[in-house]
Image (cartoon, rainbow, N blue to C red):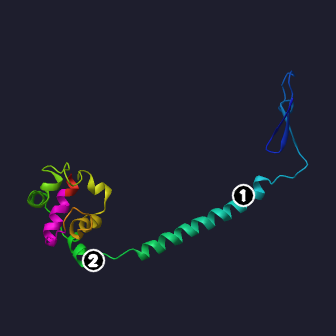
Amino acid sequence: MANQWLGLTTVINEGANLTKDTDGLVDKPLDQPLLTTEARSPLRTEVAIAMTLVIVVLAVILWLLRPPLDLYTQSVLNLSGDPVQGRSIFVMNCVACHGEWANGKVGPNLHGVSDRKSDAKLVHQVVSGETPPMPQFQPSPQDMADLLSYLKQL
């Protein structure tokens, strides 16, 4: 029985008592020469290195072009927040939209929000007012650090 697969003709010895390695399969190449694994390997390695280099260069460029943190966000992130005080700030300013336990009403559920957004993005979200209907809110850096500490616990 002859089988053709990947450019090789495979002849299977049917009905013979297979006692030797050579009795099983015999591979005969067709007219066209095939590249050996050794011949393809350097090319694949060069392509992989080139692609890796391009990805690294793009990552570095994107990192260099990221917007710098503003002074307010830097000051908030350099402070240690108190989650108990943060809860009080949340109750005074956020429960109307996010619910008493941050389960969401008009605003979204905030449980696990620190898993979805970085600290800097959370600060920006609170103070920017860029996502209506959330109003712009400008707490002191310490109050914001406290609120951030509370949000991280949700």
Magenta range is 136-150
Question: Residue 126: x and y, percent?
Answer: 21, 65
Q: Give me the disc on residue 93.
A: none
Crowding at mark 1 (Cα within 10 Å: few <14, some 14-19, many 20+): few
Q: Position of residue 11 (x, y in %)?
A: 87, 33
Name the foreground residue: 119 vs 12. Answer: 119
Relative image position of residue 149 (x, y in whole percent): 19, 60
Q: What is the quadrant of residue 120 in the picture?
A: bottom left
Main secondary structure along the magenta-highlighted residues: helix
Disc 1 target residue = 41
N-terminal of the two: label 1 or label 2? 1
- Placement of 71 over or under 105, stated as above or below: below
Residue at horizontal 11 percent and vertical 57 percent from the top: 87
Q: CA distance from mark 1 to mark 2?
A: 49 Å
- For this view, does 67 lie left or right of residue 81? right
Quadrant the N terminus occupies: top right
In the rendered view, would you say 5 is above or below 106?
above
139 part of magenta stretch: yes
**Left or right of 89, for residue 105:** right
- Side (left or right) of 105 relative to 21: left
At mark 2, the secondary structure is loop
Mark 2 lies on residue: 70
